[in-house]
Structure formats: C-alpha cells, structure tokens
Image (cartoon, helix red, strand yellow):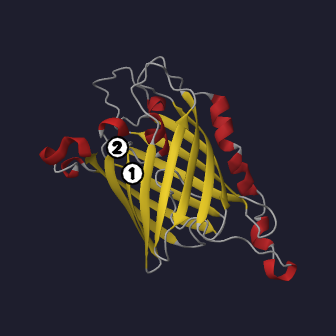
C-alpha cells in the first residue's frame, strides 16, 4: 500500500475530531447570512456537488447508466446494457455525511465521507468548500484473469476538495481538484496515483428545471491509455422537494475512480450513455 496516499486520504477526516464550529454559530445573532441552494442535487452530473444531506436524514439514490447509444436499435439504444448504482447517504450532522453504495457491472462497493469546510457568506466569504473522500473495494476483478491478484489490489481511494460559488440566483460554478488512487491499474504505463480537475456548473432555467454540466480533466493519464476525459450534460427536475436528474455522458461508471480513470466513451463518434439519478429522502 502506498502509505503517503493513505495519509493524504486521512488528513481531511481528522477534522471529524474537531468541533463543528459552523453548527455552533448563531447566524441570526451576528448577522451572518449563508448562501443556500448552490446546487439542488447531491451530484452535478458525475461529480459530487457541495450539497449535503441534512442532519438525521437518509437519502436513497438509484442511478442508472444505460449502454451506449451508438449500438442503436440492436440494444434499444443501450437499454439492454444498463448498469445500476444503489447509494445510501446519511446525515450524521448538517455538515457531515456518510454514504455506502454498490455499482453493478463492475461490482464496486464504496464508502464515502462528505463534510463542510466553509460556507459562502452573502457579502462575505465567496465560496462554499466541501471535502469528499471515498474508500473503494472492487469485487469485479477476476482471479481467473489475474491469478496473482491480492486483497489489497482491490482497494482504491479518492480525495476531493469541492469549491463552489453561487454567482447569482441562476448560476452556480464549481471546481473539484481530485486525487484518486487504484492499487490495481489495467496498464503498466498508468500511475496508480492519478490527478484530475473537475469543472462543473448549474444554470437555473426556471423554478423547476436547471441545466447542469461537468467535465473531468485528467492530468497524468498514460499516453497509451484507451480512456477519455468524462464530459457530461444533464437536466435537473425538482418535483415536490426531490430532484430527478437526467443526463448524457461518455463515462458509464458512476463512482469517482471509475468515471475519471476508466471512461471509455467518445462524444465524437456517438459512443455516449444516457442515464438518470432518482433520489428519495427518509
């Protein structure tokens, strides 16, 4: 195991041992007004947004990515080759979330942590900053194909800092510097530790609809890699307090290491995937 990567992964989690100062501030008494509704969904499209689940709230998200549209009617435009991600997210506090999910197809489990570092203040601090970490376990790697595979080879890690700004009532933008590490990579030329910069935004079209976009710029992809940078566009529909997200993307995987490191689609030749996220709060 690369202990430097593990240390990097754990640094933000040390903040859990500190008092949640934001929750102790009586914003009314000192006149602080925080920006709200920077994003309505927990994700922009593929990338995490700065939105968190509320304290003691459980959200269940069902995410589908159908097969490539390029196959046309033979697979009913990808419907026959759908993959699914089931994700539970719980609000430990208003500023700390924990999640657990399972993705079909690649058979990946991940445990995630999301936590507020700072909030955008009206006429004050200009950004909302949120940390995101994931611990990944890949059960889809075959022992028959890789007979020397060890337990540790199935592990992966993600660390992100989500930096968002609500520009105005309609427009929100976000940068997502990302470090992700896979103990097993497909090609020897690819570094196990990889770096990316996520760029995303949301534009509110009316009271119920918004246009969302995100892109992942991979910074050290191997020259021989067959994978592509993920580009995704979608629409959010607010329905009675819930958000239904529909999108097109060139990455079928829905966990961070997957869509950043192993997205195989190409917008240029129509090799893209339709999908949606449907959430339910409890």
Residue depicted at 41% across the width and 34% down the height: 262
Residue 65 position, x and y percent, is 32, 51
Secondary structure state at the residue bearing disc 2: loop
Residue depicted at 69% across the width and 70% down the height: 35
Give the side of residue 33 with respect to residue 187, left or right: right
Which of these two is toward me, 254 or 127? Answer: 127
Which of these two is toward me, 139 or 186? Answer: 186
Residue depicted at 32% across the width and 27% down the height: 143
Secondary structure state at the residue bearing disc 1: strand
Q: Quick check: can you spot residue 122?
A: yes
The residue where tag 2 is placed is 107
Residue 125 position, x and y percent, is 80, 62
Please state, as top left, top right, bottom left or bottom right, where the N terminus lies in the image: top right
The residue where tag 1 is placed is 102
Examine the rendered structure and indicate whether residue 40 appears above or below residue 263: below
Q: Quick one: label 1, few (<14), some, or many (20+) residues within 10 Å? A: many
Give the side of residue 27 with respect to residue 89, left or right: right
User: Quick check: marks 2 and 1 in contact, CB under 8 Å?
Assistant: yes
Comes first in the chain, label 2 or label 1: 1
Examine the rendered structure and indicate whether residue 100 appears above or below residue 224: below
Which of these two is toward me, 161 or 197? Answer: 197
Q: Residue furthest right?
A: 30
């Amino acid at each position: 195991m690369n202990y430097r990567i593990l240390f990097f992964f754990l640094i933000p989690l040390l903040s859990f041992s500190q008092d949640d100062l934001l929750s102790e501030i009586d914003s009314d008494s000192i006149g602080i007004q925080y920006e709200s509704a920077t994003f309505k969904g927990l994700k922009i499209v593929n990338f995490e947004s700065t939105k968190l689940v509320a304290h003691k709230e459980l959200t269940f998200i069902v995410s589908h990515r159908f097969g490539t549209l390029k196959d046309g009617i033979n697979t009913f435009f990808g419907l026959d080759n759908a993959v699914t991600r089931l994700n539970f997210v719980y609000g430990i506090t208003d500023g700390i979330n924990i999640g657990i999910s399972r993705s079909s197809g690649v058979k990946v489990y991940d445990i995630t942590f999301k936590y507020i570092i700072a909030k955008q203040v009206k006429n004050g601090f200009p950004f909302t900053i949120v940390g995101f970490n994931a611990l990944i376990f890949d059960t889809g790697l075959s022992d028959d194909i890789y007979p020397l595979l060890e337990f540790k080879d199935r592990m992966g890690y993600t660390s992100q800092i989500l930096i968002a700004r609500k520009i105005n009532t309609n427009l929100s933008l976000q940068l997502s510097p990302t470090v992700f590490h896979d103990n097993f990579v497909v090609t020897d030329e690819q570094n196990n530790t990889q770096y990316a910069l996520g760029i995303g935004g949301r534009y509110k079209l009316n009271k119920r609809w918004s246009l969302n976009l995100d892109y992942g710029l991979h910074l050290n992809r191997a020259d021989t890699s067959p994978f592509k940078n993920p580009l995704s566009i979608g629409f959010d529909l607010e329905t009675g307090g819930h958000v239904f997200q529909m999108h097109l993307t060139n990455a079928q995987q829905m966990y961070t290491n997957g869509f950043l490191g192993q997205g195989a689609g190409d917008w240029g030749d129509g090799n893209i995937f339709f999908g949606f996220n449907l959430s339910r709060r409890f």
